[in-house]
């Protein structure tokens, strides 16, 4: 590991000049923060626009031969104000003119959207007095659009070899000189790639929350924050909807053991959450790391005598789902029964067809549909080695008079998933939380 910390700042951290000042204080607060990855300016207030959204809108208008003049004015305004208030020596006007012209001439959606990060990178580099390194030079894509990590590693190492401090805009790279972006929120991925390629000791991801909370603050009042979470636990929590970080940003750093620290630009004194390798944290006692949950699932419960002896039964079920374009969340099974737990929005109006096909192809004894179900996942790395975790969960639910309709343990054994009626969801969620957090 080298003496490098890569700091990525999200859109809300760079939404206006006041936020830029905070970013500068943070960067200058640690000499190791040598490589900085910015997003495009985000919202300054709730009803504000994100620059990236406006750029996509310009592209759409231009494509449909509608004037994008007014939308582009908003973008110009934001960058000009930034450059003026920060007093940086960047000829923002000529960059904006060039971008506008290219959009008029039919520039791609990727090129257009990437300019949000590009311009912000230019301004931030000047403001920090760091070198600007265009991501198009170093982040390389393959022909079918996925990241070319090998070529990127070579390019980043070569380009940054003699550069002590640099700003590299997030979200985009290039293929054969043509700009290509990651999916939305992709600056997180750029940050992770730069951390990997510079052998960083830490990848800091600065945003507007102080890391992850143990529970949803809309359900539990003032939940505790999570100090350490493993990559695996994070997956279990994020699959139920707890999202702060782009999912693909984990892979570049996880492979090489670089921890990610989620920090809050508006509260830099908070330590935030560290996302770390399993080896780095000790599994401790009957505590949990977090709770995640979601409402509105439908459970299709299928019973058939001697199901366990019938080869291909589950394959047929899953093929029915696949051919209807439906993915499932969970599939708890007993000896003669199996349930498919599916998000209601996935099923939509396909339920009748799916049931018909199951009856026809699988010939079950009974098939029942339970709508309005909620799932709650309780996640904790210590769970698989600790006695009593399940007892605590179920005791709390029984005391809260919640009827548990389904129980499943993820095969990673760091996760217990329970199904309850939608109307019991909040009650159950709070009961589990208070069983573990005093
Ligand atoms: N600006 C891009 C977006 O809004 C990428 C990012 O912010 O990470 O999706």
Image (cartoon, rainbow, N blue to C red):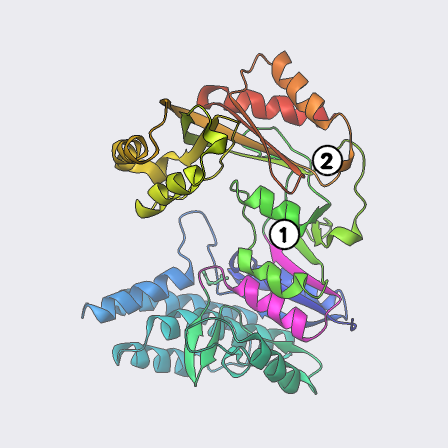
The residue at which mark 1 appears reads as 266
At 24% from the left edge and 71% from the top edge, which residue is drawn?
Answer: 62
Is 189 colored magenta in this rendering?
yes
Left/right of residue 266 with respect to residue 16 in the rendered view: right
Q: On the rendered image, what quadrant is the N terminus found in?
A: bottom right
Q: Nearer the viewer, residue 258 or 371?
A: 371
Q: Position of residue 7 (x, y in %)?
A: 65, 65
Q: Does the image show residue 15?
A: yes
Can you tell which of label 1 and label 2 is closer to the viewer? 2
Point out the tag, 1 or 2, that comes first from the N-terminus. 1
Q: Is residue 386 above or below residue 236?
A: above
Quarter of image, res 251: bottom right
Q: Residues within 10 Å of mark 1 (few under 14, many from 20)?
A: some
Left/right of residue 88 with respect to residue 101 in the rendered view: right
Q: Does the image show residue 25?
A: no
At 33% from the left edge and 29% from the top edge, which residue is drawn?
Answer: 363
Tag 2 secondary structure: helix
Q: Position of residue 233 (x, y in %)?
A: 65, 45
The residue at which mark 2 appears reads as 383
Is 197 colored magenta in this rendering?
yes
At 26% from the left edge and 78% from the top edge, which residue is drawn?
Answer: 104
Q: Nearer the viewer, residue 132 or 44?
A: 132
Q: Nearer the viewer, residue 327 or 152?
A: 327
What is the CA distance from the residue labelled 1 to the residue labelled 2?
A: 34 Å
The range drawn in magenta is: 183-207
């Amino acid at each position: 590991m080298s003496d490098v910390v890569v700091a990525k700042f999200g859109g809300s951290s760079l939404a206006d000049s006041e936020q830029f000042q905070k970013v500068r204080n943070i960067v200058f607060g640690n000499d190791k923060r040598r490589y900085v990855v910015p997003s495009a300016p985000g919202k300054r207030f709730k009803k504000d626009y994100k620059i990236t959204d406006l750029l996509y809108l310009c592209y759409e208008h231009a494509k449909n031969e509608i004037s994008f003049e007014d939308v582009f004015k908003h973008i110009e305004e934001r960058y000009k104000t930034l450059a003026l208030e920060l007093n940086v020596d960047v000829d923002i006007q000529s960059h904006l003119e060039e971008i506008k012209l290219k959009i008029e001439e039919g520039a791609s959606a990727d090129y257009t959207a990437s300019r949000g990060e590009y311009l912000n990178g230019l301004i931030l580099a000047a403001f920090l007095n760091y070198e600007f390194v265009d991501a198009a030079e170093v982040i390389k894509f393959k022909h079918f659009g996925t990241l070319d990590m090998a070529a990127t590693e070579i390019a980043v190492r070569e380009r940054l070899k003699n550069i002590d401090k640099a700003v590299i805009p997030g979200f985009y790279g290039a293929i054969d000189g043509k700009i290509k972006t990651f999916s939305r929120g992709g600056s997180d991925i750029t940050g992770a790639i730069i951390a990997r390629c510079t052998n960083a000791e830490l990848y800091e991801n600065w945003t507007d929350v102080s890391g992850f909370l143990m529970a949803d603050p809309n359900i539990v009042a003032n939940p505790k924050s999570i100090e350490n979470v493993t990559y695996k636990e994070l997956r279990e929590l994020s699959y139920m909807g707890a999202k702060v970080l782009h999912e693909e940003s984990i892979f570049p750093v996880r492979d090489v053991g670089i921890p990610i620290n989620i920090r809050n630009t508006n509260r830099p004194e908070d330590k935030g959450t560290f996302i770390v390798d399993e080896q780095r944290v000790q599994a401790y006692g009957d505590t949990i790391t977090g709770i995640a949950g979601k409402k509105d699932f439908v459970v299709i419960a299928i019973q058939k005598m001697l199901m366990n002896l019938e080869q291909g039964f589950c394959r047929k079920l899953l093929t029915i789902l696949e051919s209807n374009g439906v993915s499932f969340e969970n599939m708890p099974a007993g000896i003669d029964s199996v349930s498919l737990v599916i998000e209601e929005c996935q099923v939509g109006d396909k339920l009748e067809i799916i049931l018909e096909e199951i009856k026809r192809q699988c010939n079950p004894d009974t098939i029942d549909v339970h709508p309005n179900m909620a799932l709650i996942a309780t996640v904790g790395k210590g769970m698989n080695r600790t006695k009593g975790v399940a007892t605590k969960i179920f005791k709390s639910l029984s005391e809260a008079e919640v009827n548990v309709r389904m129980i499943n343990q993820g095969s990673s054994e760091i996760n217990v998933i329970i199904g309850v009626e939608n109307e019991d969801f909040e009650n159950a969620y709070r009961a589990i939380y208070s069983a573990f957090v005093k």
